[in-house]
Amino acid sequence: MHNFTASSKEFVEYLQIEKNASRYTVKYYQNDLEIFFGFLDQEGITSLYEVDQRVVRLFLTSLYEQQLSRRSVSRKVSCLRSFYRFLERENQRITNPFTHVSLPKATRPIPGFLYMEELEKLFEVSDMTDALGQRDQAILETLYGTGMRVSECQGLLIGDIDFSIGTMLINGKGRKERYVPFGRFAEIALETYINEGRKTLLSKAKLTSNAVFLNSRGAPLTARGMRLILNKLVDKAALTVHVHPHKLRHTFATHLLNEGADLRSVQELLGHESLTSTQIYTHVTKDHLRKVYMNSHPRANEQ
């Protein structure tokens, strides 16, 4: 009998040590493996060696019967393909039953973004005489001003910000580091918060912290805490659109492309490993492209 738990543990160690996978990737893969192992138990399959094309088809059918999205099913197949590839490397007697599994590509949703009028409303609601208001404004300016992920913003340390040259060191996915510039608005908001509001918040804590963004008790702010803060700001601004931290990242990319930034530069700023990930933002600039065309092409309008 093959030990499912032991194989899963070895695979997770491989992801963490050799692949530098983020804790989110590890968490999702562990969950996908548990679902797969649960299916094998239901089918009375006691060994990973017994899994063949027939078993794989049954597994996929069970996923579709649960009405999972194509994207969710694709991720599970990707996880299990990697898992069996790892097992193949460790044991030559096992073959990868997921090698030739093909799934229809899921249509990638067009990312939502905010218009400048909506952004302006968000930037106007924080009380800059209050420690928490200064923090909230600094979070907004940082997320929009750099396009960083909420997890990257939450993990930002004081030493990561270099005000002398206006850049931040961001620790991204897969422990990859990148430097990102920030502008005057973000600089003012961060300097105000760090020199005033952050000191007030830090004085409430029992332990010191190098984290840039702190909660009301002076402890490092969590990613969930940032989302709650953004929800409150949206309510204060009386916006009807749903705004989450990632939408500010989408907005950052969209506004840069609309103003003529090249895709390769935006890829570097976002920390995307592949240009394909960045290309999705070109879909939300079609209105802008039409305006450019109408204003620039000699035969677009009657003279």
Image (tube, grey):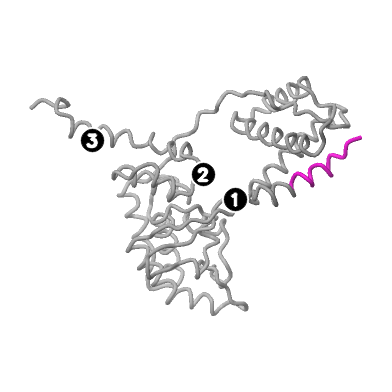
For label 1, the residue is 174
Amino acid carrying mark 3 in the image: Val
Residue at 42% over, 76% down: 195
SS assignment at label 3:
helix
Amino acid carrying mark 2 in the image: Glu
Left/right placement of residue 138 relative to residue 217 reads left
Residue at 51% over, 66% down: 213
In contact (CB < 8 Å): disc 3 and disc 1: no
- Residue 273's tag is 2
Q: Is residue 237 magenta?
A: no
Between the C-alphas of marks 3 and 1, the distance is 38 Å
Amino acid carrying mark 1 in the image: Gly
Q: Earlier in the sequence, mark 2 or mark 3?
A: 2
Left/right placement of residue 286 relative to residue 54 reads left
Among the 4 quarters of the image, the one containing residue 73: top right
Left/right placement of residue 179 relative to residue 95 reads left
Please identify the residue farthest to the left as the structure is shown.
303
Find residue 153 and report its horizontal and vertical position in percent.
Answer: 50, 59
Between the C-alphas of marks 2 and 3, the distance is 29 Å
| Image quarter of the N terminus | top right
- Magenta stretch prevailing secondary structure: helix
